Amino acid sequence: MHHPVLLAQVIDGLDITPEKKYIDATIGEGGHVMAILRKGGCVLGIDADNRQLTYLQYLKEQYPRLTLIHGNFANIESIARENGFFPVDGILFDLGLSWEQLQSLGRGLSFKKYDEVLDMRLDLATDYTAADLLNKSSRSELNELFMRNAEEPASDRLAQEIMNVRRTHAINIVGDLVNIIRKVTPDSWEKTAVRIFQALRIEVNREFENLKAGLEGAKNVISKTGRIAVISFHSREDRIVKQFIQKNHLLPITKKAIPGSRDKSFERSAKLRIFSL
Ligand SMILES: C[S@@+](CC[C@H](N)C(=O)[O-])C[C@H]1O[C@@H](n2cnc3c(N)ncnc32)[C@H](O)[C@@H]1O
């Protein structure tokens, strides 16, 4: 069962009005978009994972006001222009991947799927996989990657152990990487694994670069009175959003980011920022 994160706060914050135009830049399983459609909004839904769009065909049949596009939100401006959603009254980014995707994509995104290949690409046109990074990067590059994307305290020791293992065999499947993490941080290996898998996924899919490009595009697509909502799950993502708002002198709707509920495991690390031009 999919639970949309901070649903009521997103719908209130975007001030959904019948007939107005919205973009859901990360349509996913359709949790947020369903609420926007029920309130009468016209929606352009984008997702980089084509399986999400195939799954959502049923919703399109129910609501002809929904347009579905397979693409990267880094290109939100051209996608919006090409599909007649320019300007729009509200834009939502619900970042990262859904729990369902992490479990079912079959590309080594979950540290619990020991036999899966360490691919991690959302879009198979992306030129390198997580295994490429692990097998071809230098020790200092890996150390830097784990620091930059995960603020990982054991980053240097992990990078060193990856070098040691590579002398005998390549690191190709989830189990190979989990063994390294268990060896280096035996007492807290699950927490380390969460951070390291997320760090690799962010790098492979260029998540921070896409977010920066997506925010720039959204600023050009939003109407003068429209609002942009961003849900992030990582401190660096939230920092990118916060700095973007400051640098462009945008107007935050709430002074501080709205945190997800501590009582709901799926939104514990979420932060929502809503702003306008
Ligand atoms: C957290 S889920 C969104 C869940 C959705 N709000 C819902 O309620 O069902 C994030 C979605 O964004 C997609 N995604 C991640 N990066 C993307 C990108 N750069 N461009 C477009 N979609 C992306 C993922 O494939 C995933 O379906």
Image: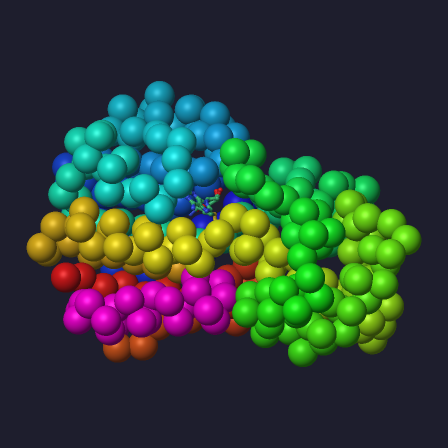
Residue 170 x, y percent position in the rendering: 82, 48
Residues 200 and 192: in front is 200
Question: Is residue 191 visible to us here?
Answer: no
Residue 46 x, y percent position in the rendering: 36, 37
Asked if 70 appears above or below 127 in the picture, the reply is above
**Looking at the image, which residue is at 78% across and 69% down?**
160
Q: Which stretch is magenta? A: 232-254
Residue 198 x, y percent position in the rendering: 61, 58
**Looking at the image, which residue is at 81% across and 66% down?**
161
Relative horizontal placement of residue 271, taking residue 197 as reference (left or right): left
**Looking at the image, which residue is at 17% across and 31% down?**
84
Q: Quadrant of the C terminus?
A: bottom left
Residue 48 x, y percent position in the rendering: 45, 38
Relative horizontal placement of residue 134, taking residue 217 as reference (left or right): right
- In the rendered structure, does residue 241 fall within the stretch colored magenta? yes
Q: Quadrant of the N terminus?
A: top right
User: Residue lying furthest top in this view?
Assistant: 61
Residues 263 and 224: in front is 224
Quadrant holding ligand 1? top left
Asked if 235 appears above or below 8 in the picture, the reply is below
**Looking at the image, which residue is at 42% across and 24% down?**
57
User: Residue lying furthest left in this view?
Assistant: 224
Relative horizontal placement of residue 52, taking residue 74 as reference (left or right): right
